[in-house]
């Protein structure tokens, strides 16, 4: 494999500003006044972030382990794996993420102000909706990285983040506020935008907040925000009466090689993809690739916790109806379904220099279905548990073959889920060897309750589905934070590092230059 001399492109470099800390004091594009529908529509392209929080969140999950000191690693991955505050400032670092998302917010705010200066005409309602969704999305991504999970019991205690609403705001001069204020602001922007979303203004809708993507965002947000009825309502709009129409058909993937799987997974023609966001990131090389192999999703994790663990649909790499199980690539140190492959923007192919990219399917029909299933399960009661299981069976129908060897695709019921989970040992937070691992994790919900028995077992099973669906995209860390799932990162020759329920390290530390400029750091 040829080594790529990639160049980390931060938001401040892209905007050519003198300081990364004061970019919100400036217009993102001061070359021309934004005073027409076309200019506003074009400006909104820059309201989507070019940074990604995938690496930070994924390396904080229970999806990764240590392969040993004989393997190499980069500083960022090691700092994240050890739950240390990050000093690295390159691709995928807290600094790049902070600057990238707040830069996108600055563009969204400029578009909003331009529309308002034009009298907020009806012809720009859809653009206003897109701008508010972009602002809310970047703030949501920042919140899921730098804040604790939403907890109504501690929302006035936990720190939020500055929420700039005009181009004159400087993050350094704004208070962080509380988590409640942050989530209220995100919710306000989403609710204001949804009625006016329109696909008509987009030439390539899946790179923008088209109608289904907007409601998928609202679905996930309301699940985390514990508005379960609204989560279900919005998911219904995305999924319609035939959820499989916006879900991934894995059958064709079985005929592809790694590169073709990676390309197909992020195509706009793939019905499951609702919103695709490209980003400058090394995640395609170091999470699903073979780069920096010391810490990652290895064969032991695949065998005892994720793809190959014994489930009603099978186990191992054979006799397993799960499509993923037979489409894994890599080595013993890095086992991956190639959903997040690297793309290179070449500067000079001869010198092998360029920018590393990923294309992230941020919202999909498959994940939206599992959000709805979880909302049903959390509402509780036998009727809602059955609705949750109905959705889980739809997911199985698209993710599992009818048969593989002697194994048949299962049909779940509340009863057989209860029996299956009840027959498993609960994985300890600190496993004593691989055989101590299990897909069954103890739940310590943060700010809500889950009844022991049938409701808990359905949710444990469902969280495993979410783990498989979102692996390598970082969303597992939000599930860990929300449910207080305790886990340990084993370190060769050293004591393990354990993440506990309500662990304050769930809020990644702000970049050094941000705290040095005056913003309050996350407590430790």
Image (cartoon, helix red, strand yellow):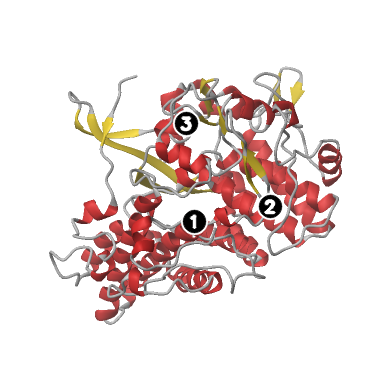
Image coordinates for residue 154, horizontal then vertical, percent: 63, 69
Q: Residues within 10 Å of mark 1 (few under 14, many from 20)?
A: many
Quick check: marks 3 and 1 in contact, CB under 8 Å?
Answer: no
Mark 2 or mark 3: which comes first in sequence?
3
Image coordinates for residue 69, horizontal then vertical, percent: 50, 25
Quick check: marks 2 and 3 in contact, CB under 8 Å?
Answer: no
Q: Is residue 82 left or right of residue 448?
A: left
> Circle 2 is placed at which residue position?
373
Quick check: marks 1 and 2 in contact, CB under 8 Å?
Answer: no
Q: Could you say whether the residue bearing mark 3 is in a helix, strand or loop?
A: loop
* Residue sitting at x 75%, y 62%: 379
Q: Is residue 349 above or below residue 175?
A: above
> Circle 3 is placed at which residue position?
288
Residue 102: image quadrant is bottom left
Image coordinates for residue 346, horizontal then vertical, percent: 23, 33
Look at the image and tell me in which quarter the C terminus lies.
Answer: bottom right
Look at the image and tell me in which quarter the N terminus lies.
Answer: top left
* Residue sitting at x 68%, y 58%: 375
Q: Is residue 48 visible?
A: no
The residues tagged by marks 2 and 3 sit, at their Cα atoms, a distance apart of 28 Å
Labelled disc at residue 212: 1
The residues tagged by marks 1 and 2 sit, at their Cα atoms, a distance apart of 18 Å
Labelled disc at residue 252: none
Q: Is residue 301 above or below residue 79?
A: above
Mark 1 or 2, closer to the camera: 2
Residue 129: image quadrant is bottom left
The residues tagged by marks 3 and 1 sit, at their Cα atoms, a distance apart of 28 Å
> Residue placed farthest to the left in the image?
31
Mark 3 or 1, closer to the camera: 3
Along the line of sight, the residue nearer the viewer: 95 or 11? 95
Q: Could you say whether the residue bearing mark 2 is in a helix, strand or loop?
A: helix
* Residue sitting at x 66%, y 31%: 400
């Amino acid at each position: 494999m040829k080594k790529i001399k990639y160049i980390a492109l931060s938001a401040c470099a892209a905007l050519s500003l003198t300081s990364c800390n004061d970019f919100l004091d400036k217009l993102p594009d001061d070359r021309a006044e934004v005073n027409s529908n076309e200019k506003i529509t074009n400006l909104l392209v820059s309201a989507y972030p070019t940074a990604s929080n995938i690496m930070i969140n994924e390396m904080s999950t229970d999806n990764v382990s240590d392969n040993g000191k004989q393997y190499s690693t980069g500083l960022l991955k090691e700092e994240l794996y050890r739950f240390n505050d990050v000093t690295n400032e390159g691709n995928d670092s807290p600094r790049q993420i902070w600057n990238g998302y707040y830069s996108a917010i600055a563009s969204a705010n400029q578009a909003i102000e331009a529309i308002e200066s034009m009298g907020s005409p009806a012809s720009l309602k859809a653009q206003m909706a897109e701008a508010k969704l972009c602002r809310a999305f970047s703030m949501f991504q920042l919140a899921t990285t730098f804040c604790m999970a939403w907890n109504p019991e501690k929302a006035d205690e936990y720190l939020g983040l500055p929420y700039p609403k005009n181009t004159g705001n400087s993050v350094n001069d704004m208070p962080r506020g509380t988590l409640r204020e942050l989530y209220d602001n995100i919710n306000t922007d989403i609710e204001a935008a949804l009625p006016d979303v329109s696909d008509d203004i987009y030439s390539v809708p899946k790179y923008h907040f088209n109608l289904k993507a907007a409601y998928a965002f609202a679905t996930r947000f309301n699940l985390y925000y514990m508005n379960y009825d609204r989560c279900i309502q919005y998911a219904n709009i995305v999924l319609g009466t035939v959820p499989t129409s916006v879900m991934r058909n894995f059958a064709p993937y079985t005929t592809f090689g790694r590169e073709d799987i990676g390309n197909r997974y992020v195509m706009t023609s793939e019905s499951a993809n609702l919103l695709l966001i490209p980003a400058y990131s090394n995640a395609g090389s170091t999470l699903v690739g073979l780069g920096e192999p010391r810490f990652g999703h290895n064969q032991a994790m695949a065998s005892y916790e994720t793809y190959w663990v014994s489930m009603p649909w099978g186990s191992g790499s054979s006799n397993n109806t799960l499509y993923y199980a037979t489409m894994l690539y890599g080595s013993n140190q890095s086992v991956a379904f190639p959903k997040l492959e690297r793309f290179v923007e070449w500067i000079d192919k001869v010198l092998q220099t360029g920018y590393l990219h990923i294309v992230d399917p941020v919202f999909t029909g498959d994940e939206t279905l599992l959000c709805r299933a979880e909302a049903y399960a959390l509402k509780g009661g036998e009727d809602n548990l059955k609705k949750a299981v109905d959705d889980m069976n739809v997911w199985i129908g698209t993710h599992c073959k009818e048969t593989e060897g002697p194994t048949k695709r299962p049909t779940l019921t509340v009863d057989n889920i209860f029996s299956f989970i009840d027959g498993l040992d609960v994985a300890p937070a600190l496993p004593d060897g691989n055989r101590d691992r299990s897909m069954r994790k103890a739940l310590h919900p943060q700010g809500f309750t889950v009844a022991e028995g049938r409701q808990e077992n359905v949710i444990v099973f469902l969280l495993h589905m979410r783990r498989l669906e979102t692996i390598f995209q970082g969303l597992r860390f939000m599930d860990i934070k929300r449910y207080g799932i305790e886990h340990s990162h084993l370190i060769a020759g050293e004591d393990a590092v354990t993440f506990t329920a309500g662990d304050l390290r769930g809020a990644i530390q702000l970049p050094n230059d941000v705290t040095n400029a005056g913003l309050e750091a996350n407590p430790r």
